Image (cartoon, rainbow, N blue to C red):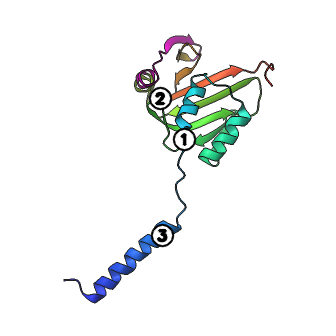
Amino acid sequence: MVTPSRWRAGRIWGTAAVLAAALSPPAQALPIDFSDKVENALLCRSEWSTAYWQAYFDKALQKPLRDWGEARWWSAQGAQLGGVSATELFINIGDGRALMIGALISQPIEQARPAIEARLRTSFKPIQAADGTRYINDTLSVLAPTSDGQTKWYCARWNLGNRP
């Protein structure tokens, strides 16, 4: 049997929980076309600029996590890209000689590669690079293993200066 004092205590705690949930900042949902836009960029199938992606990620993903390795990094907020979960996204800093957009995937390349290939109907072929094997598809999208067992997926294009 619930006594009046227990009922009041339960009601107070329930009210406190509702207030805490109402006052906490809402989780920001990713734009509905987020995955499509980013996948197209990662597959080197879209026109883009560093300024465009800087503004888009600032709006969709909030503040960047850090600037590191000549790139600006954001939390991917659980975005599903090519059938895998991205943990972070990055773009190069500035419109220099190369334009780059990429994603860090927590899965090893042996798991990420087949999932991306099946989901996006593409095929990544191995090539030997100075620092190990990378995988490249027909649009020059790249999958590369990282030293900590993750996968980096990116598109890099040279800025030839002939675009407005």
User: Quick one: quadrant of the C terminus?
Assistant: top right
Residue at 52% of width from left, 54% of height from top? 27
Residue at the outermost bottom position: 4
Residue at the outermost left position: 1
Q: Residues within 10 Å of mark 1 (few under 14, many from 20)?
A: many
Q: Under tag 3, what secondary structure?
A: helix
Choose the circle earlier in sequence order: 2 or 3: 3
Which dot, 2 or 1, sits closer to the camera?
2
Give residue 76's mark. 1
Above or below — where is 49 with respect to 26? above
Separation (CA) of disc 2 from disc 1: 13 Å
Q: Do the numbered discs 3 and 1 sit on residues whose CB atoms are within 8 Å?
A: no
Residue at 63% of width from left, 41% of height from top? 57
Separation (CA) of disc 2 from disc 3: 36 Å
Choose the circle earlier in sequence order: 2 or 1: 1
Provide residue 160's location: percent of width, then percent of height.
78, 18
Residue at 80% of width from left, 19% of height from top? 162
Provide residue 159's location: percent of width, then percent of height.
75, 21
Q: Amino acid at mark 1?
A: Ala
| Quarter of image, res 154 | top right
The residue at which mark 2 appears reads as: 82
Q: Residues within 10 Å of mark 2 (few under 14, many from 20)?
A: many
Above or below — where is 22 with respect to 156? below
Quick check: can you spot residue 147? no
Q: Is residue 129 or residue 53 the one in the foreground?
A: 53
Q: Do the numbered discs 2 and 1 sit on residues whose CB atoms are within 8 Å?
A: no
The residue at which mark 3 appears reads as: 20
Which residues are drawn in magenta?
Answer: 114-131
Q: Amino acid at mark 3?
A: Ala
Q: Amino acid at mark 2?
A: Gly
Choose the circle earlier in sequence order: 3 or 1: 3
Provide residue 136's location: percent of width, then percent of height.
54, 15
